[in-house]
Amino acid sequence: MLAATVTALAASLVMSMTVVGGVDFDYQGELDIYSGTPIDSEETNVQQTVSLADGGLYNRETGMFSYPVPGSGQSVYSSVADGMITADSVALAYDEGLTVKLYRSGEEITDTDISSVKEPGDYSLVVYGTDVEQQMLEFTIVPEKTGAVSFYKLPLGFDLTSLMVEGEERDITDVSRADMSSDGEYYINYHCNLTDIDYTLHVFIDHTPPAVTYEGVNEGAASGPVTITGTEGSDTVLVMKDGERITTPSDGVLTTPGSYEVTVTDDAGNSVTERFELLFYLNLQAGLFAVLFCLVIGAAVGYMIWSRNKLRVR
């Protein structure tokens, strides 16, 4: 009986020493100096702001990349890293006091909300000031289907982890870039080594230009009507005649003489251009009109001759 009592008291003492006030005394990790509670070492070791290989920073809380403007103590901010290609919209911001201009394909754009940039194109963000004029960031936005890119050179500090084309995994020979030269559906998976975050670019690549023919054109010239064939419903047809844009005929037939430049662009951005001279010619309607005109002139001349002879007889 005494042995059982001693055993129970010992067990109770051990339990009271192990857990007192919710504190586990068997815990071997770090403790909060104020509450005495355990600290999750994994969460503590994750830095909120990470320095990147390209000199920028990444904020885990906001999910934004920042790039300090030299000598100003200010920064520009972006939802994508410098050099990224994305199919999503891009959010941009900058510190108050900076003069920032956004360019697409080399032209300044002023009618775009930089907090949500959506239009496809090659972009660059430039900071202007009394002592600084520097490109801080460049990125590319692509539509779901495009022929505008043939390779993806990953941002500095990012590595390619897998490349899927038309459902088949391709061998990776260079972790710094993805070959996008062939047509097909792409899944490009890559990884930031410093933030330990994975990214995926999903896009349909189409480098094949429209298969358009121009019936009636021979060696840059046509002596009759020209018919544009082979266009798809999603294609855009631009017709220039003598340097001015004209309405594209619904039947695709060009009949008016002049110098033409016809550009056909598909939904992936691929285009083909044809230049030719449409010479003067007589179609059936014009031919009938010419014959009728000649008959009228002939009749008028005949009538004049008849009238003159009649007068002489009198």
Image (cartoon, rainbow, N blue to C red):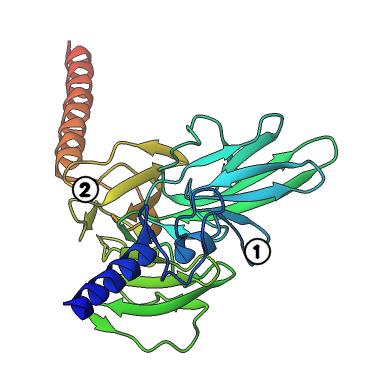
Is 312 situated left or right of 270 in this image? Answer: left
Residue at the spot of label 2:
253
Label 2 environment density (alpha carbons within 10 Å; few <14, some 14–19, many ≥20): some
- The quarter of the rendered structure image containing the C terminus is top left
Residue at the spot of label 1:
54
Q: Is residue 124 above or below residue 41?
A: above
Q: Nearer the viewer, residue 197 or 69?
A: 197
Counting from the top left corner in percent of width and height, residue 142 is at 39, 55
> Is there any visible trace of residue 278 in the rendered image?
no
Q: Is residue 221 above or below residue 27?
A: above
Please state which of the two labelled residues, at mark 1 or mark 2, is closer to the viewer: 1
Furthest toward the front, the residue is 2
Is 67 situated left or right of 239 in this image? Answer: right
Is 304 situated left or right of 201 in this image? Answer: left
> Is there any visible trace of residue 300 in the rendered image?
yes
- The quarter of the rendered structure image containing the N terminus is bottom left
Q: Dot 2: what SS?
A: strand
